[in-house]
Image (cartoon, helix red, strand yellow):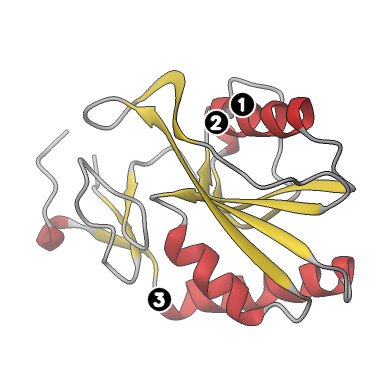
Amino acid sequence: MQQISKENLKVLYQEQEIQKGIADLALKLNADFKDEEVYLICVLKGSVMFTVDLAKHLTMPVKMEFIRLSSYGSGMTSSGKVNAVDISLPDLNGKNVLIVEDIIDTGHTARFLVDFINHNFKVKTLKFCSLLDKKIKREVDIDADYYCFEVDDKFLVGYGLDYDGCFRNIPYIGYIEN
């Protein structure tokens, strides 16, 4: 794979497309949760932009929590092993919980989080929400309950997604043509 720079990125989703997808997703969440309080569990660092923009469209009472996990080693491939960097959460017993991720690909992180919450709490509801769903890469039997876009097997950067810590601040989602 060639070196990634902003100049050689191809745009997959423009900023306006991302925002429309988030607004449409929020309509579904608002209908499903109505006026019930929801805990948004933002998985740092990648999903922070998505979580913040999504929260702006939600009409129900929202509490936001942030956890930090890692499943990527160096470079562009998932290690397949989830590292819980910081996963301290408040008491979620009896609460509606929505895990918010930037992308679900192999499913290892999603499975880890769902199992962790189910093991430690008796929540009212637990749903998984992802900006991007890369079903083609799934190694674990888990699906997002909500997602904005299904994507092909490309390495994506921008709008929170990074390569070696860079490119998270790009307002669109891009990729490198192979």
Would residue 49 appear left or right of 109 to someone viewing this image? left
Q: Which residue is mark 1?
A: 112
Pick whichever, 116 or 156, lies toward us: 116
Pick whichever, 78 or 14, lies toward us: 78
Q: How many marks?
A: 3
User: Which three-letter amino acid code belongs to the residue tagged 2?
Assistant: Thr
Q: Which residue is mark 3?
A: 15
Hey, which residue is sitting farthest front in the picture? 91
Would residue 144 appear left or right of 35 to someone viewing this image? left
User: Which three-letter amino acid code belongs to the residue tagged 1?
Assistant: Phe
Pointer 2 local density, CA inside 10 Å: few below 14, some 14–19, many at least 20: many
Identity of the residue drawn at 28% across and 58% down: 168
Relative image position of residue 16 (x, y in whole percent): 45, 81
Identity of the residue drawn at 60% across and 36% down: 135
First in residue order: circle 1 vs circle 3: 3
> Which structural element holds mark 3?
helix
The answer for how far apart the CA atoms under marks 1 and 3 are is 30 Å
Pick whichever, 125 or 6, lies toward us: 125
The answer for how far apart the CA atoms under marks 1 and 2 are is 5 Å
Pointer 3 local density, CA inside 10 Å: few below 14, some 14–19, many at least 20: some
Q: Are marks 1 and 2 in contact (CB under 8 Å)?
A: yes
Pick whichever, 164 or 152, lies toward us: 164
User: Which three-letter amino acid code belongs to the residue tagged 3?
Assistant: Glu
Q: Which residue is mark 2?
A: 109
Q: Could you tell me if residue 45 is visible in this image?
A: yes
Relative image position of residue 160 (x, y in whole percent): 36, 58
Q: Please, is residue 107 above or below residue 132 in the view?
A: above
* 1 or 3: mark nearer the eye: 1
Q: Could you tell me if residue 142 is visible in this image?
A: no
Q: Please, is residue 35 above or below residue 164 in the view?
A: below
